[in-house]
Amino acid sequence: MKFAHIADAHLGAFSKNPSLRELNLQAFEMAMEKAMDEDVDFILLAGDLFHNPIPDMDVVKRSVEIMKKVRDAGIRIYAIYGSHDFSAGNTSLMDVLASTGIFTKAVRMDARDDKIILREVEDETGVSIVGISGLSSSAEVHYFEHLDMDYLRSIPSPKIFMFHTTIEELKPDYISYKNAVPKSLLPKGFDYYAGGHLHERIESSVDDSPLIYPGALFGATYNDLDILGQRGFYIVEDFKPRFVEIKVCDFFKKIINADGLSAKDVYEELMELAQKNYEGKVVILKIRGELSSGTPGDINFHEIREEFRKTAIDVLINTYSLTARERRISAPVGSTKEEIEENVFRSISTYGLRFTRELFNILRERMPEDMRKDVFEERLWSSTYPLILSAINGEYLGEEESKEEARREMEAEREAKKEEPANRERKKPSQKGRMPTLFDFGGDAS
């Protein structure tokens, strides 16, 4: 008996970046082709097959074509929901695809009294597959606490337990997930534990049986692309796992220390770096530190990106930890809350007071309790992007505001001369034509 264990494909991730979205699809296709080359009996998909419950139709078409090729080769596919596949109150695409026979859902759940019974699905090889899908937050712990362990023990071997959740003892240090499931809540007596959800490759065990997280095939976020090492899946023969690497591109990663550099210095260093050949690579740059003069906004990152893209597949620039030296400004004063707020906006506004107010009103919105973080971030970005683009094109600076901005700039320049008279840059480069990205605002551009 031989099977493949794949998890966290996240098909459709990087929806705003066609190059990365295509690489993600290629990683899934490569994994399925390697599984066919290994002549496996079946394939386990341990959750987060898609990045959204209802992904783009072109992504669906490609993924169905890939899985149909596997099914036509006589290889069966068993799948469970991941946290991204699941949509409360709506029919997921996973349900639709299961109804067509592309794969079989390995989750068959009944409730009896205060117990949750997970029914097995028996493969042609004689192995029983039991699955529990990824759920939200504390619901996962609740479900595991109420599993009917007597029933699970009664299922004869050989048997596999599929799950999509964080196991407390195995989570990486950078994850502060409060509702992780302790390993003690996993049912005992299974021959293999097929995990999903954690994007790093992890090998562990329950008693003497393998507990495996294969990790992401490519990655679902820019942070994944930065921190993940080897990517791939597992071939498991007679319950002995073997890792198979998936590599669709190379990565070039570099940290730029901007401490003591001017905005012009950073720009020139990045442009010089961009002259190298990055064919077949995704470039990831982190720029950190405090600029000696100028601001991050003075650096034309759009031009830098275009220069890298002459040879690289793509370039990701993270400026979250890049700061400018503070300028001394008069403390805003006012007799009312509104006046104080107005004066604060005047002291920080670059594109006009109306722009600053509108952006502030969007960003002060709190995330609804019933909304996923990625959906809320998408909504914020769809609201802020047109606003920022209009500001860069000068649409928010009226005549009165232009005069106010000129006056404020002159005052700031006079203050600057008092503090740093000799070598201070007098004029900021124009920001017109610069295309902003979420990385520039410390976020995620996916």
Image: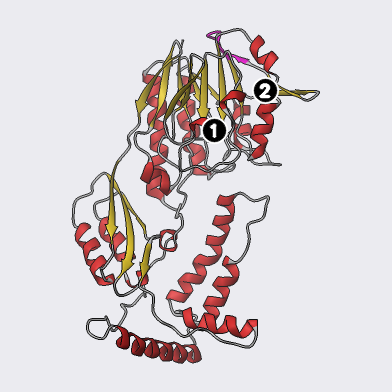
Query: Residue at horizontal 31%, vertical 84%?
Result: 419
Query: Residue at horizontal 64%, vertical 41%?
Result: 87
Q: Is residue 443 above or below residue 109?
A: below
Query: Residue at horizontal 37%, vertical 43%?
Result: 227
* Three-letter amino acid code at the position of disc 2: Arg
Q: Nearer the viewer, mark 1 or mark 2?
A: 1
Name the spot of residue 336 as percent of width and height, x first. 65, 85
In the picture, the disc for residue 302 is none
Query: Counting other residues with Cα less than 10 Å from the Cα at mark 1, is it few (<14), some (14-19), or many (20 or more)?
Result: some
Q: Which residue is mark 2?
A: 108
Q: Which residues are magenta?
A: 121-128
Q: Is residue 77 above or below residue 189?
A: below
Question: Which residue is more in the foreground, 49 or 376?
Answer: 376
Q: Which residue is mark 1?
A: 168
* Three-letter amino acid code at the position of disc 1: Glu
State whether residue 188 appears in this view.
yes
State whether residue 104 appears in this view.
no
Q: Is residue 411 above or below residue 96?
A: below
Name the spot of residue 251 as percent of width and height, x first. 29, 44
Quadrant of residue 363 within the rendered picture = bottom right
